[in-house]
């Protein structure tokens, strides 16, 4: 599997797991699967991205993606997916890549409304210690996601050619649909965090 596809599908699986855990529909069954998937992905995604022929890392990611899929199927995804689906459709961006472009900013936006849940995700990912406060752990999760996306060569929406005037009208209804299972502020205020600036030429025209 090519490195780009490995990265995009791996971050998609991580998004499934985190969103399943922080969703309003989360439950004890989905929680265990989600945290296990987060833990496994944290240990193996960079490794398999660096060496696609590492069979142990491939197997671990396969199992983690499956657990994450079962988790969100019994819980829900949330705002990252609510925004990434229309970006993929309108700008022809691969689903996992559109998730990855949004994941750190949306997590930073959402974490204050469910700090303890995001803190659990940070600890499972290996980004925070048990002794860290929930607030610190949630902040470290955001930084860990930014670092992961940098290591996996994930572009920003702006760098990918997506500009504000092109993206807000189609995304807004879907983002608000995703917000039904999302804990946080109105997603309409997220534009600045995504660095979507007017005046750039957008794709999909």
Image: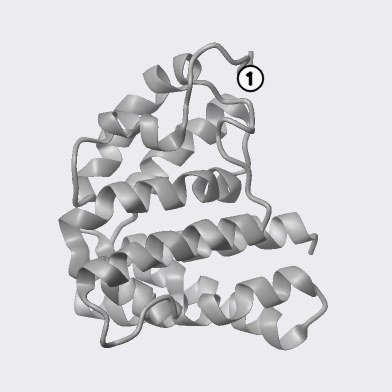
Q: Secondary structure at mark 1?
A: loop
Task: Tell me residue 133's x, y (percent).
Answer: 21, 76
Q: In the picture shown, does residue 205 fall above or below 38?
A: above
Q: Which quadrant of the figure contains the N terminus?
A: bottom right
Could you say which is closer to the camera, residue 79 or residue 198? 198
Q: Is residue 168 above or below residue 81?
A: above
Q: Position of residue 106 (x, y in %)?
A: 36, 47
Please rate how many residues cluster around mark 1, counting C-alpha atoms within 10 Å: few if below 14, some from 14 to 19, many from 20.
few
Q: Quadrant of residue 168?
A: top left
> Which residue is found at the position 55% from the left and 61% from the top?
147
Note whether residue 34 is visible: yes
The correct choice, above or below, for 39 with respect to 74 in the image is below
Q: Is residue 136 left or right of residue 82?
A: left
Colour mode of the rendering:
one colour
Residue for point 56% across, 25% down: 162
- Which quadrant of the figure has residue 95? top right
Q: 149 and 65: which one is in front?
A: 149
The percent coordinates of residue 128 (x first, y second) are 37, 78
Position of residue 107 in the picture relative to residue 203 (left or right): left
Quarter containing the C terminus: top right
Taking the spot 44% from the left edge, 70% from the top edge, the residue there is 68
**Quick check: can you spot residue 74?**
no
Residue matched to label 1: 204
Residue 73 position within the rendered picture, expressed as x and y whole percent measured from the top left: 36, 63
Please give the name of the residue rendered at 61% of the width and 79% of the height, measured from the top-left corner.
44
Quadrant of the image occupied by residue 82? top left
- Total labels: the figure holds 1
């Amino acid at each position: 599997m090519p490195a780009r596809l490995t990265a995009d599908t791996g971050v998609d699986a991580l998004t499934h797991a985190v969103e399943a855990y922080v969703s309003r529909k989360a439950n004890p069954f989905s929680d265990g699967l989600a945290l296990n998937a987060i833990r496994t992905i944290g240990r193996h995604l960079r490794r398999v991205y660096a060496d696609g022929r590492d069979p142990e890392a491939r197997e671990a990611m396969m199992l983690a993606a499956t657990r994450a899929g079962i988790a969100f199927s019994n819980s829900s995804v949330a705002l990252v997916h609510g925004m990434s689906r229309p970006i993929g459709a309108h700008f022809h961006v691969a689903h996992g890549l559109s998730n990855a472009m949004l994941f750190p900013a949306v997590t930073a936006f959402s974490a204050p409304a469910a700090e303890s849940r995001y803190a659990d995700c940070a600890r499972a990912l290996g980004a925070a210690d048990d002794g860290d406060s929930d607030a610190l752990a949630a902040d470290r999760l955001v930084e860990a996601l930014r670092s992961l996306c940098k290591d996996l060569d994930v572009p920003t929406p702006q760098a990918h050619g997506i500009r504000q005037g092109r993206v807000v009208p189609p995304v807004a209804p879907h983002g608000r649909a995703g917000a039904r299972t999302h804990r946080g502020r109105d997603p309409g205020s997220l534009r600045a965090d995504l660095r979507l600036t007017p005046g750039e030429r957008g794709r999909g025209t």
